[in-house]
Image: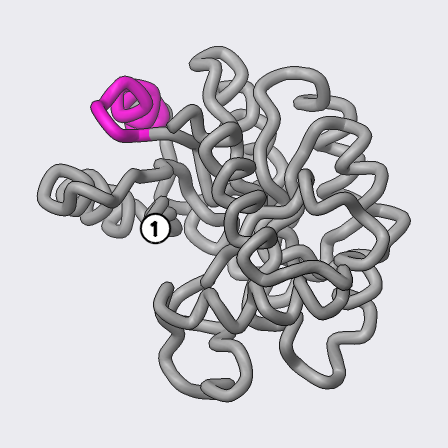
Amino acid sequence: VVNVSASWKDLLDTLDLIQKVPFMYGAVGIHPDHVGELNEERLRQLREYCHRDKVVAVGEIGLDYHWNVEPKEVQQEWFVRQLHLATEEKMPVIIHSREASQDTFDIMKKKHAGTTGGVIHCFSGSAEMAKEYVKMGYYIGIGGVVTFKNAKKLKQVVQEIPLESIVLETDCPYLAPVPYRGKRNSSLYLPYVAEEIAALKGAAAEDVVLQTEENARKLYGL
C-alpha cells in the first residue's frame, strides 16, 4: 500500500504509519486544498522527508478548481514548486486534478514531462488526454469509479489505453466500488476494480492484478 498525503498532518501521520506497518509505503506532498499550509520552511522539510526510508513519491499535488479553497494562482505556484522538488529529488509524482484538466495537463507538459514520471490519480479526463499522458510516460490511476454505471468516459479510457499504463487505486476512504458505493472505501475492495477493468479489456482479472502490481512496483521503485 502506498499511503498518500494531503494536508501537513496527513504527511506526518503517513511518515509514522510507514514505520509501523511493514507493507505500507508513503507519498509526501500537499494537496491543492491545503497549499495554504506551505511556506519556505515547510518546503525545506518536505525535501528532507523525501529522503526518509519507504517514502516513494511526492503527492498528492495538483489543482482543484471544484472547491477553490485556495486561489488558482496560489495552487499553481505550489504545484509547480512541488513538481520541481520531485524532479530534483528524482521521485515520481501523484497528481490530483479536479475540474482543472487543461491547466493540470499544460503544467505537467511544460514543467515535468520527461523527468521522473508518476500517476494521474483518480483520472477523470478524456481518453484523448489519457493517451497524451501515457505518451509522456505517466500511469493512469483507476479506482472504484470505473465500476459505476454512469462512468462511461472512464470506461472508455480503460478500453483505449494499454494495461501497462494503469495502476489500481482506492482513494480511501472515498469512491468505494460497486457494490459498496457510498460506504467507506478499503483496499480490500480492489478486486472489484480489477474485475471491471478485466471485463472492459476482455482479459482475466488475475492478469490485470499481476500487470498492475508490476506497474506499481516499477512506478514507485519497489
Can the viewer see residue 63 in this picture?
no
Between 27 and 47, the one lying in front of the other is 27
Between 117 and 158, the one lying in front of the other is 158
Give the residues drawn in magenta, as a range. Answer: 42-55
Up-down relation of residue 172 to residue 63 (above or below)? below
Please give the name of the residue rendered at 32% of the width and 27% of the height, measured from the top-left corner.
Answer: 46
Up-down relation of residue 215 to residue 40 (above or below)? below
Between 192 and 173, the one lying in front of the other is 192
Residue 201 is left or right of residue 173, and the answer is right
Residue 197 picture location, percent across and down: 66, 63
Question: Total label count?
Answer: 1
Residue 199 picture location, percent across and down: 71, 69
Residue 125 is left or right of residue 185, and the answer is right
Please give the name of the residue rendered at 46% of the width and 62% of the height, measured from the top-left corner.
Answer: 171
Instruction: Kindly give the residue lying farthest to the top in the view shown.
Output: 88
Instruction: Kindly give the residue lying farthest to the right in the view shown.
Output: 128
Residue 163 picture location, percent across and down: 70, 46
Please give the name of the residue rendered at 64% of the width and 61% of the height, measured from the top-left corner.
Answer: 204
Q: Which residue position holds label 1? A: 7
**Residue 43 belongs to the span the image colors magenta:** yes
| Colouring used for the render | one colour
Q: Quadrant of residue 11?
A: top left
Residue type pointed to by label 1: Ser
Up-down relation of residue 102 to residue 43 (above or below)? below
**Residue 44 belongs to the span the image colors magenta:** yes
Can the viewer see residue 124 in this picture?
yes
Q: Quadrant of residue 65?
A: bottom right
| Crowd rating for badge 1 (residues with CA inside 10 Å; few <14, some 14–19, many 20+) | many
Where does the C terminus fall, quadrant-wise? top left
Q: Secondary structure at mark 1?
A: loop
